[in-house]
Amino acid sequence: MMKENVNSGTNESPERGMTILLFIIQWWKHLLVISFSALLISAIASFFIRPQFKATSSVFAVKSFSVSKYLTDGLKEDYMDIGDEDDIEKLMQIFNSSELQDLVVERFDLYKHWDIRADDPNKFTWMHLKFMEMVTFKRTDMLSVKIEVHDYSPDTAALIANAITEFSDTVKFRFTKRIAVQALNILVDEYDKTLAFMKKLEDSMAVLRTKGVLDYNLQVEAYSKSLGKALAGGNNAGVLKIEERLKKLEQFGGPYLSLTNEFILQKERQVYLKSKLDEAYMNATKQLPSNLTVQKATPSDKKDKPVRWLIVFVATLSAFFFSVMVLILLEKFKQLKKKMT
């Protein structure tokens, strides 16, 4: 029973194909007229489509690290070394960012160039859709990124493609600068506070110097030697004078030592903050490239779109098959109507 079903199924396919072929032969005049009309209309319509030219640029992502790390820490890596998967992903994020798109749109006045009305309430949406249609970014197997730009002008297409590689550095610098500037402001604040605190310590130490405390350790050592000599020589007046000075040191020496030790700690902190401040300033004002251009875009002398023969072929083929389907449905409908009557 199953074999019969299988055989009947296999026999149905040739029969069905033969039926469709006979049907096409039966209606060949109608199908020819429809197909020829579609060919003619699509051929004429294709000439009204504005031709587009393609410009291509290829770039490699470079390794990502801060300017300060490279210049001050003596990194062995070359900032022009080819980046890895993470670096390519970061570069793709920059290429697809709205900030880069805005820079390109502004430079080339794309609202006017691509005929998007400035008073249209949805102009930003239309521009975003148009930009995605005309500009594409593709990762290659060689760990590079291919930038393809279509435009109605071959020169503008090349200019946009090259501008994108240029603006990628600008966008990356803006992203990193936001963080670097915040870090710089924090460090400036901490550095100023440290300097102010050191000034207070110096003022307090200056007050103690007026009390005769210049250098506690040296003075104690010197007074101790002088006291020994005075005692050995029986110089009572000298002994009293030295003992009076030692009492002052005993009274003010402790605070002086505390201030001195704290000042040393703050001085070390000030040196550390100064080095970090220099790094933050470098990161906030200097930039390293985000990509290495392998192929610069040049104007094309041949249009890329539309492919007129493809438009005509697809339109004609679609019209033909659609007509066949409609005629089959009409034939089925007639047969069904006859059965019902």
Image (spheres, grey):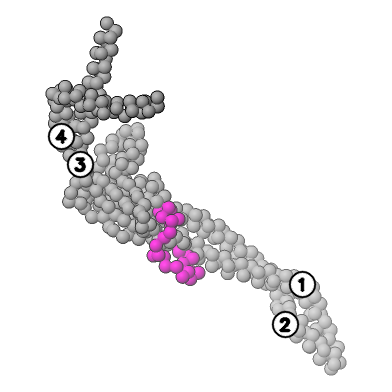
Q: Which residues are magenta?
A: 67-91
Q: Is residue 202 left or right of residue 308?
A: right
Q: Is residue 78 magenta-colored?
A: yes
Residue in view at x 56 percent, y 59 percent:
189
Query: Which residue, given by chain and number where applicable, does mark 4 sit on?
Result: 43
Residue holding disc 3: 307
Task: Give x and y (percent) for residue 341.
Answer: 27, 5
* Left or right: 258 as drawn, with respect to 84: right
Lower sequence index among marks 2 and 3:
2
Q: Amino acid at mark 1?
A: Gly
State if disc 1 and disc 4 touch (CB < 8 Å). Answer: no
Tag nearer the camera, 2 or 3 = 3
Q: Write down the residue under mark 2.
A: 218
Q: CA distance from mark 2 to mark 1?
A: 14 Å
Residue found at x 26% / y 17%: 332
Q: Up-down: is 252 above or below 33?
A: below
Q: Amino acid at mark 2?
A: Leu
Secondary structure under the numbered disc 2 in the rendered image: helix
Q: Residue furthest bottom?
A: 233
Relative to 178, 234 lies left or right: right
Looking at this view, is 223 or 180 the one in front?
A: 180
Write down the residue under mark 1: 254
Q: Nearer the viewer, residue 214 or 124?
A: 124
Residue 240 image point, x, y percent: 84, 84
- Secondary structure, mark 4, is helix
Q: Residues within 10 Å of mark 1 (few under 14, many from 20)?
A: few
